Image: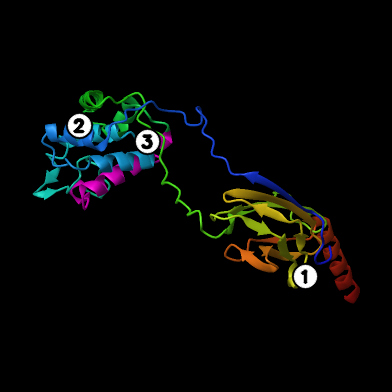
C-alpha cells in the first residue's frame, strides 16, 4: 500500500457513557457505617484503635472488604488492639489482627494501625480469601483461625451484628478513586485510551492485520481534528501509513473509535504510532511507539527455501 493511502481507516465518534448495572457486582448488601460510628464503637470497647474509623472505611472500600468485617476481626483477635501477641517480651506492634506474615509471629510488626488495616484489607481481598471464593465468615474462619475456629466465628459474628454487618458475605463493591475534575476552560487534549489493539491472526507474510484504538478529548474545550494518521513502518522503515482526512470535532469527554487494516507483505519487525492534525500541524498522540510486532514467512515458504539451499549444497558436492 503506497504512503499516504486514503483508504482503510474507519472513524466512529461515540460519547463516553458511565453505566452501572445492578447485577454487575455479585455481592453485597453490606453494612454502611460511617467513620464516626466505627470510632464510637471502638471507644466503647476502650480500643487504642479509636480514631481509625476513617481508615477502616477507606481501606475496606478500596479493596472490596466490608469495613465492619475488618473491625470484627480486630475484636476477635486482640480485643480491638488491646492485647497484642507477644513472646519473650517481643510484641507484634500494631498487629491487632494477628496477621502473621513474618517467619515468626513476633516479627510480624506494623508501623501503625493504619498500615495494619491496609495490609489486612489487601490480604483478605487477595488469593487466600476472597480470591479463592471464600466470602462468608464461616468459609473464611477455618483458614484465618484454624485453632479455636468456633469461638472466633461466634465473636466475629457478634461484633458484625452490633454494627449491622452481613456475615454471609464480607465483600463490598470496591470504590475507585474519583476521576479528576477537568476545568471547563482547560484546553482540549487528545489522548489514547488504553493501547492500540491488534487482532490475534497469523503474523505471516500474505496475511492481513487489523488494528483499532480509541482517542478521547480529555480537556475542557472542543477539539477540531483535521485528520488522523496511523503511521506504520515495515521492515527497513518502509512506510505503510493509513490516513483519514475527515474533519471531526470532538467535544469534551467525547471519543473517536478508529479501526483499520493493512496487508503484511514483508517479513521482519513492524511498528507504528498515532498522529492527529490540528490547525494544520500534526502531533504525536501518546508517549511514542504505539505497537510493534514481528512478521514471519509462511512455513511452506521456509521449507521451499530450505529445499533450495539443500539442492544448491548437493550440487556443489
Q: Position of residue 244 (x, y in %)?
A: 76, 58
Residue depicted at 79% across the width and 56% down the height: 262
Query: Callout 1: helix, strand or loop?
Result: loop
**Which one is nearer the viewer's eye here, 56 or 227?**
227
Task: Give the residues in magenta.
Answer: 105-132
Q: Residues within 10 Å of mark 1 (few under 14, many from 20)?
A: few
Q: Is residue 239 above or below residue 32?
A: below
Q: Is residue 197 visible?
A: no
How far, Cα to Cα, is label 2 from label 3? 18 Å
How far, Cα to Cα, is label 1 from label 2? 68 Å
Most prominent secondary structure in the magenta stretch? helix
Which dot marks residue 238?
1
> Circle 2 sits on which residue?
76
Which dot marks residue 129?
3
How far, Cα to Cα, is label 3 from label 1? 53 Å
Residue depicted at 34% across the width and 42% down the height: 123
The quadrant of the rendering that contains the N terminus is: bottom right
- Disc 1 vs disc 2: Cβ atoms closer than 8 Å? no
Amino acid at each position: 500500500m503506497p504512503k499516504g493511502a486514503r483508504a482503510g481507516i474507519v472513524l466512529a465518534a461515540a460519547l463516553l457513557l458511565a453505566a452501572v448495572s445492578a447485577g454487575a457486582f455479585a455481592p453485597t448488601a453490606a453494612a454502611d457505617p460511617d467513620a464516626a460510628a466505627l470510632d464510637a464503637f471502638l471507644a466503647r470497647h476502650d480500643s487504642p484503635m479509636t480514631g481509625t474509623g476513617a481508615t477502616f472505611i477507606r481501606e475496606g472500600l478500596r479493596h472490596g472488604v466490608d469495613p465492619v468485617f475488618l473491625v470484627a476481626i480486630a475484636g476477635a483477635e486482640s480485643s480491638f488492639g488491646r492485647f497484642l501477641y507477644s513472646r519473650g517480651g517481643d510484641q507484634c506492634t500494631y498487629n491487632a489482627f494477628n496477621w502473621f506474615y513474618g517467619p515468626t509471629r513476633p516479627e510480624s510488626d506494623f508501623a501503625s494501625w493504619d498500615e495494619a488495616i491496609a495490609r489486612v484489607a489487601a490480604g483478605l481481598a487477595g488469593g487466600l480469601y476472597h480470591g479463592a471464593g471464600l466470602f462468608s465468615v464461616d468459609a473464611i474462619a477455618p483458614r484465618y483461625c484454624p485453632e479455636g475456629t468456633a469461638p472466633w466465628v461466634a465473636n466475629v459474628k457478634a461484633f458484625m451484628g452490633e454494627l449491622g454487618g452481613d456475615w454471609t458475605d464480607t465483600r463490598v463493591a470496591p470504590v475507585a478513586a474519583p476521576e479528576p475534575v477537568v476545568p471547563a476552560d482547560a484546553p482540549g487534549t487528545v489522548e489514547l485510551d488504553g493501547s492500540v489493539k491488534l487482532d490475534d491472526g497469523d503474523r505471516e507474510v500474505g496475511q492481513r492485520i487489523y488494528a483499532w484504538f480509541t482517542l478521547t478529548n480529555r480537556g475542557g474545550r472542543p477539539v477540531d481534528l483535521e485528520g488522523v494518521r496511523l503511521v506504520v513502518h515495515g521492515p527497513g522503515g518502509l512506510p505503510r501509513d493509513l490516513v483519514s482526512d475527515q474533519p471531526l470535532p470532538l467535544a469534551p469527554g467525547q471519543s473517536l473509535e478508529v479501526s483499520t487494516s493493512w496487508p503484511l507483505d514483508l517479513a521482519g519487525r513492524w511498528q507504528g504510532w498515532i498522529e492527529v492534525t490540528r490547525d494544520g500541524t500534526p502531533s504525536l498522540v501518546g508517549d511514542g511507539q504505539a505497537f510493534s510486532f514481528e512478521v514471519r514467512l509462511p512455513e511452506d515458504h521456509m521449507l521451499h527455501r530450505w529445499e533450495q539451499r539443500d539442492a544448491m549444497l548437493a550440487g556443489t558436492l
